[in-house]
Image (spheres, rainbow, N blue to C red):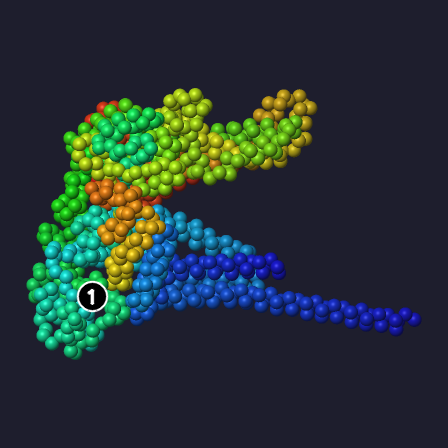
Amino acid sequence: MMVNKKGLLAAGAVAVAASLALAGCSGASSSKSGSSDAASSTLTVWVDADRAAVLKDAAAAFTKESGVTVKLVQKDFGKIQEQFIAQVPTGKGPDVTIAAHDWLGNFVGNGVVQPVELGDTAKDFQKVAVTAMSVEGKTYGVPYSIENIALLRNTALAPTAPATYDDMIAAGTAAGTEFPYLVQVGPESDPYHLYPFQTSFGAPVFGTNADGSYNAGDLSIGNAGGEAYAAWLAKEGAAGHLSVNVTGDIAKEKFNAGASPFLITGPWNVPDAQKAGINVAVDPIPSAGGETAQPFVGVQGFVVSAKSKNAIAANEFLVNYIGSEKVQTELYKVGGRAPALTSAFEAASADPITAGFGAVAAKAVPMPSIPQMGKVWQFWGVTEAAIISGQGDPTALWQKMTADIQTAIK
Amino acid sequence: MTHPGTERDEAQVRESKRSRQAARIAEAASAGVKTLLVKIFLLGIVDAISVYALFVLLLRADWVVFGAVLLVTLIVNWIYFSKQKLPAKYLTPGLIFLLIFQIFVVGYSGYIAFTNYGTGHNSTKQDAINALIVSSQQRVPDSATYKLTVVEQLGNYSFLVTEPDGTVSLGGTDAPLRPVTDATLDATGKAVALPGYASLKFNDIVGNQEKIAALSVPLSDDPNDGTLRTPDGSKAYLYLSDLVYDEAAGTMTDTKANTVYADNGKTGSFVAADGTELLPGWKVEVGLANFAKAFGSESIRGPLISVTLWTFAFAFLSVLTTFGLGLFLAIVFNDLRMRGRNVYRVVLILPYAFPAFLSALVWAGMLNPQFGFVNQVLFGGADIPWLTNEWLAKFSIIFVNLWLGFPYMFLVCTGALQSIPDEIQEAATVDGARPFQVFRLIKLPLLLVSVAPLLISSFAFNFNNFNLIYMLTNGGPRDVTAGVNVGSTDILISMVYKVAFVGANRDYGLASAFSIIIFLLVALVSVISFKQTKALEELN
């Protein structure tokens, strides 16, 4: 009899789990569909843990004003892209999610986002942020932060900012440290961190259209500037300035230990450097090829689901609440990334670190979000690594890479 | 003489028998009632939840899942209320779990292999059409912002707009904008009310936002002038759409370039005559196309043979080395003469306690040619390219896997060794066998009987050991002149990952097709190995 009871319990548990799972599978939005009175409108927003606390206040204010309940769902930032694409078509996805701008190409290609009309507020944001949030001329999100790399300088080892790459090497050599400057490369290279050098030779990955968006048909990475950059990589690799053995961890550790006056990195490594007792200044990345060294800018913002039944409420929340100076400043305070709203950015620029990265961002370019970019990385990094390690003729390797990318994106 | 006594005794006996019987019946009955109550209570909970789920599903008109839940609930009730079917009572819970979490998942993955599910094909055709239309709405460059009041009359919504020059107009979906004169203006000059119409407040707009967001009011009778739409209920902007969907013909027309995109019924997307595809598309069944792609495309076919060979070599060598070292250590630490064996055993098991991907990352750091511990300390600053030379990288992978995997084999072998009776060894020694002979002829065969199935499962695990490859070398080093994204330490599963998931692009269909192929390979090897193990068992 006892055994039988246990069996019963197990059966109970199974049936409960099973019917919940099955019911869950088919979607829990029953409370949302069919209801059309204002009181029960709920705006579901996906947000990462750091941002959730700030949004709570904005959400409360919005609810008070509009009567729309905002449900904040915490998500692991790294998993949002995939989950959003998977869930929106089922109708179970959120109305609004936090997103990085380089996911947009994928989002648009999958038809899971709808355009957001910034209207006249578009000019209140930094231009690079709005450009980054746009695909084929249409804006798909409200940006809140801008992130990019710059040159971090240990002011004890190098008192002045270098004007050119050669200045930097000279200052680094004069400092007598283990490395004249540091940039993370790694066994498969790191095209993101090396990109400012590449653009200083006039070889962006893709050409741009008149409105600043990337033109996938114009693969400019293999132009004459690209070949000059490849030759430069080989030269610097042979001189020991660039090495595939220097990974991100090693570069950071050595800089924090005072083994180099310069490190090319982003704001994420600044707190640790300061903790290690280093006085850091943020400078523009010196040009190696003569033109302006433009790093990639990463923009984060909020986008609206293509299947949202609350498009107007979502738009209102994004443009008038997320886009407000107060929320943008709060978001800056928790994340440390420069605000996308110009007025909030100007206020945040009282901090020299933010101002330094912001000055670089003003001349930088958005990371391409077009789907073709996904196919560039797989050839780009390993080729740079091969050139830096001196495996073959730089020009030939670079042209081979260009041809491979061309084939892949066709 | 004894008769009356006997009679009394008999009566007593009968009475006590009867009372015992009665007590037993009563006990049984009460126990039965208790069990029945528990049974009814628990099944009541189950049924209550099922009925709730059924209602939810009914409202959503989700008939397939509705039927499944109903069927399962009925079966569960039938089984547990019946007096027999004892085996079913034990098996049902497990079977339900098996169905939901194993059979369904496997079946679904198998189904995906025959579709084009992935980036750009992740939903239905209707969703794709909606997404295309929505994202083709282009705001007319430099057009004005119209101040908007949404008004309602008899359940129909209209736009009451104030143009920048102060003109007030009214329009609806079927009625192009026409000027009105009797509107009430507020202090800013914005028209906020019109006689005969009710103005909507933000709350009302939000309450009916699906309809209002879908409203598009033609600017004039000429559709090429564009339509007004509102993203927020208080401002309207002028939009032009380049894409028009022709429902009857099932085609999309780009009005700017005058191109017609038609559904060709194969790729799950709208395709123009010249082959240009509009994305997003939708999910369709593609038959064996994914399998054809798996064997047909150059980026896969080229490296497939070498990758398959290396996968087998890696899995085989991993099992061999970890088993060899594990067995050796198990024998050494099984010797009673060894002091402090338990301490050593604990230390040896430590690598097993670390998460494998963490260890792999730590090893990747230690094997760094310039800064890593191995070259710096063990090889006195030598510049050995552990992870960037093709053959050294292969060696490093197997070596790190040995470090990660031997504790498991050590544990398994220790257990198996201890279950071999000492008498057998003593008997063999008495018969004059040398220690190595005892090991080779007696212990090893006995050991293999119990360990062989674990070796086979270890082979299957290493065959798909994605974590190690991904974390340690990411499949590299790669020959950049080969032009394919596959390196010399890539195994099948990591190659599948690279080929099916490029950047942010996900080709779930292709990945599922590959996993079926890999499953077949592993199953084949396992079947052959298990046959061999059976032969081993018959030896005994």
Counting every numbered tag in the picture gives 1
In the displayed structure image, the side of residue B158 where residue B398 appears, left or right: right
Residue B250 visible? no
Residue A298 falls in which quadrant of the image?
top left
| Label 1: which secondary element | loop
Q: Nearer the viewer, residue A231 or B338?
A: A231
Query: Dot 1, crowdedness within 10 Å: few (<14), some or many (≥20)?
Result: some
Q: Amino acid at mark 1?
A: Ser
Q: Residue B65 at x, y = what percent? A: 38, 60
Q: Residue A124 at x, y = what percent? A: 20, 54
Q: Please, is residue B425 above or below residue B176 in the view?
A: above
Q: Nearer the viewer, residue A204 or A328?
A: A328
Q: Please, is residue A303 above or below residue A287 in the view?
A: below
Q: Nearer the viewer, residue B183 or B384?
A: B183
**Residue at image x 32%, y 66%?**
A64
Q: Residue B186 at x, y = what percent? A: 16, 72
Residue lying furthest left in this view? B222
Q: Please, is residue B345 above or below residue A30 in the view?
A: above
Q: Nearer the viewer, residue A273 or B111?
A: A273
**Residue at image x 81%, y 72%?**
B11
In the picture of the structure, the residue carrying the numbered disc 1 is B234
Quadrant of image for the C terminus of chain B: top right
Residue lying furthest bottom in this view? B196
Quadrant of image for the N terminus of chain B: bottom right
Q: Residue A263 at x, y = what percent? A: 31, 34
